Amino acid sequence: MDNLRIFLSSTKLDLQETRKSVLKFLSVLKGTVMSMEVFGSDESKPKEFCLGQVRQSNLFIGIYAERYGSIDPDTRLSMSELEYWEAHKLLDDQKLLALLVYIIDPKSPWPIDQGGSRPSAG
């Protein structure tokens, strides 16, 4: 595919290092990566901007852990969840090549300062 447009979705605070690693990997692909790191400022509302970026993509990658993310006041859903549902709709409409979702293993310990809980002692 000549015009690969990849949208990377996740929460930022808890997945900063993961995002860096994924973006580094994606940088070797021929295509455009759309992620919050390169969005810059825009006059539109964050929800409208992000969903517009998802609509311009043809590959969606979602990476999710313990945090829910920033809440849109109109829908009371997180931006990450709104992005996912928009991508799911695009996939159903065959406007998206693939929707790839990666979720942390629920049994995996996650640092408490990253929104997770301490592993049980036994």
Image (spheres, rainbow, N blue to C red):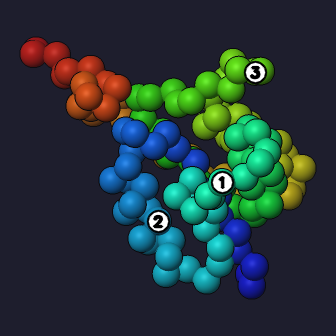
Q: Disc 2 vs disc 1: which is toward the camera?
A: 1
Residue 15, horizontal then vertical, whole percent: 39, 45
Picture quadrant where residue 5 is located: bottom right
31 up-or-down from 122: above or below? below
What numbered label is drawn on residue 10?
A: none
Give the side of residue 11 with respect to residue 42, left or right: left
Residue denoted by label 1:
41
- Which residue does the image show at 77% across and 48% down from the upper left? 43
> Where is residue 91 drawn, in percent x and y?
80, 50
Residue placed most toward the observer, 108 or 46: 46
Instruction: Indicate which disc, 2 or 1, sits on the residue closer to the N terminus.
Output: 2
Q: Give the spatial CA distance, label 2 vs label 3.
A: 29 Å
User: Given the image, on which type of amino acid does mark 2 rest?
Assistant: Leu
Q: Position of residue 9 (x, y in %)?
A: 58, 48
Residue type, label 1 = Ser
Q: Earlier in the sequence, mark 1 or mark 3?
A: 1
